[in-house]
Image (tube, rainbow, N blue to C red):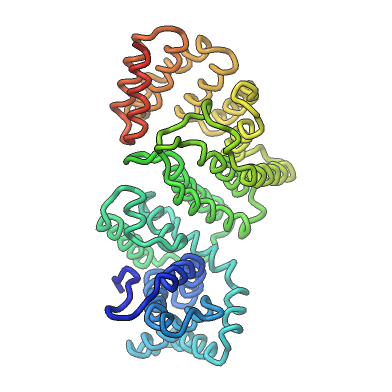
């Protein structure tokens, strides 16, 4: 089914019903698709069945009202659609007899009973859906699109707008991803042993990619896209509940909670960027900070119990916690941040981590100590088009009073960024060097 969850023409609908149906879909779609994928063993077919159920709801609920248990209603509608589909296709081999029997059997259940059955299985089903959406067989951009579609409940147009791409591009990625999973016969299961850790790494990467695009938009007119951060946070929290014994899962949750606490302070009244050192810290969300610090403590406790060093996300969360605990930029424990970046660089060597470490060194020891660290990165191929390298270098030169050189760096950084707000900020900084 290719409809974008639209109602049949002529059906009366109120804006209140519209909002209710949209809210129900956002809450229930991932659970519904997960349960259906377990039954039909095809994520593409499962999504089609879920959307068919939603179309049925769009047609009926404006007349009958939203049912008391909308998730169970949608599951029953999707189940009946699956039975019809299997019968129409005459798929009567043993496997499909078993599927039809399972579906037919649940016909005897009330909606509340069905919901209870789903709840019994939902943890495993959701975890399987997360792992299959983020499967390494898919390209990273396809993993992101499929995850937002299946687990975030976002429409194709919403994903396209979030990443400033055409709907056709996003639709193609989603269709291709589902086809790849089907053709490769990827099992709908939670992997075990070493494969579990490998696949978990992919899941965490996808969630953090989504969060980062919301936190610092790579392109467009907006400095941040909070809705994407909220989607990533929700996925991170779900994963922390489903995999409570993995330190890095809590580490990523902690990192996103603490980073998200600053979203309101990262933009000014007209949407202009406000850098960390200039932010009004009274606008930081203390509830999110408390959640983040709690998740960080849990991540560190699990790692310690297992005799493991903190992982990459946990170390990044510890850095974010240093900022969250400081009342002002000046009272931030920059020496600890510098030491944490050194640990992070040893664990996951990366030019970007070295650049961030240089910033911490400049705050702890002064710009003259940091500039040589930055200059070592100038010939790094992976940073050739990375706008933050000349931006950070320009800041160091500005602090050292080397204004002409600083202006050149800020102008170069402005030419590399694709975000309009960030470009203006960098050009303003270049102008200030005059």
Residue beneath the point at 32% across and 35% down: 420
Measured from the top left, where is residue 169 in percent x and y?
A: 26, 55
In the displayed structure image, the side of residue 34 where residue 167 appears, left or right:
left
State whether residue 38 is above or below residue 308: below
Question: 262 or 132: nearer the eye?
Answer: 262
Residue farthest along the top direction in this orientation: 401
Q: Position of residue 135 (x, y in %)?
A: 44, 56
At 72% from the left and 44% from the top, the residue drawn is 301
In the image, residue 314 above or below residue 206:
above
Q: Quadrant of the N terminus?
A: bottom left
Q: Is residue 326 left or right of residue 231?
A: right
Q: In x, y percent, where is residue 421?
A: 35, 34
Horizontal side of 403 relative to 24 (left or right) equals left
Residue at the right extreme? 305
- At 60% from the left edge and 17% from the top edge, which residue is drawn? 364
Q: Residue 251 location, x and y as percent?
A: 61, 44
Q: How many numbered discs sit on the rendered protein?
A: 0
58 or 342, nearer to the observer: 58
Image quadrant containing the C terminus? top left
Task: Out of 361 and 331, give the one closest to the viewer.
Answer: 331
**What residue lies at 48% left-to-right and 77% top-to-bottom?**
39
Task: Identify the image quadrant of residue 326.
Answer: top right
To which quarter of the image does residue 409 belong?
top left
Q: Single out the residue that lies furthest toward the bottom.
A: 108
């Amino acid at each position: 089914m290719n409809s974008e969850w639209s109602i049949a023409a002529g059906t009366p609908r109120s804006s209140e019903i519209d909002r209710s149906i949209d809210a129900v879909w956002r809450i229930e779609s991932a659970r519904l698709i997960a349960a259906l994928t377990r039954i039909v063993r095809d994520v593409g077919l499962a999504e089609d069945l879920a959307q068919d159920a939603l179309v049925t709801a769009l047609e009926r609920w404006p007349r009958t009202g939203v049912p008391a248990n909308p998730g169970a209603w949608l599951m029953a509608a999707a189940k009946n659609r699956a039975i019809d589909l299997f019968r129409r296709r005459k798929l009567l081999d043993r496997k499909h007899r078993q599927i039809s029997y399972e579906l037919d059997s649940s016909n005897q259940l009330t909606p509340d009973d069905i919901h209870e059955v789903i709840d019994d299985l939902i943890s495993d089903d959701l975890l399987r859906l997360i792992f299959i959406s983020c499967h390494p067989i898919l390209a990273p951009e396809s993993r992101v699109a499929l995850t937002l579609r299946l687990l975030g409940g976002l429409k194709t147009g919403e994903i396209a707008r979030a990443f400033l791409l055409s709907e056709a591009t996003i639709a193609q990625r989603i269709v291709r991803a589902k086809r790849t999973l089907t053709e490769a016969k990827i099992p709908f299961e939670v992997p075990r042993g070493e494969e579990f850790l490998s696949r978990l790494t992919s899941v965490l990467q996808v969630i953090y990619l989504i969060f980062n695009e919301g936190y610092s938009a790579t392109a467009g007119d907006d400095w941040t896209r909070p809705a994407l951060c909220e989607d990533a946070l929700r996925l991170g929290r779900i994963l922390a509940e489903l995999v409570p014994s993995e330190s890095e899962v809590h580490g990523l949750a902690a990192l996103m909670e603490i980073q998200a606490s600053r979203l309101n302070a990262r933009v000014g009244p007209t949407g202009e960027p406000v850098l960390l050192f200039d932010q009004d810290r009274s606008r930081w969300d203390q509830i999110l900070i408390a959640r983040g610090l709690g998740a960080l403590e849990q991540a560190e406790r699990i790692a310690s119990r297992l005799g493991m060093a903190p992982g990459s996300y946990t170390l990044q969360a510890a850095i974010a916690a240093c900022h969250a605990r400081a009342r002002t930029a000046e009272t931030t424990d920059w020496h600890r941040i510098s030491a944490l970046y050194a640990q992070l660089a040893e664990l996951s060597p990366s030019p970007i981590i070295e650049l961030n470490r240089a910033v911490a060194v400049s705050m702890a020891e002064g710009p003259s100590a940091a500039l040589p660290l930055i200059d070592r990165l100038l010939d790094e191929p992976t940073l050739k088009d990375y706008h933050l390298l000349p931006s950070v270098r320009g800041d160091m030169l500005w602090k050292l009073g080397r204004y002409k050189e600083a202006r050149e760096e800020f102008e170069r950084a402005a030419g590399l960024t694709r975000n309009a707000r960030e470009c203006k900020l960098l050009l303003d900084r270049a102008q200030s060097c005059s």
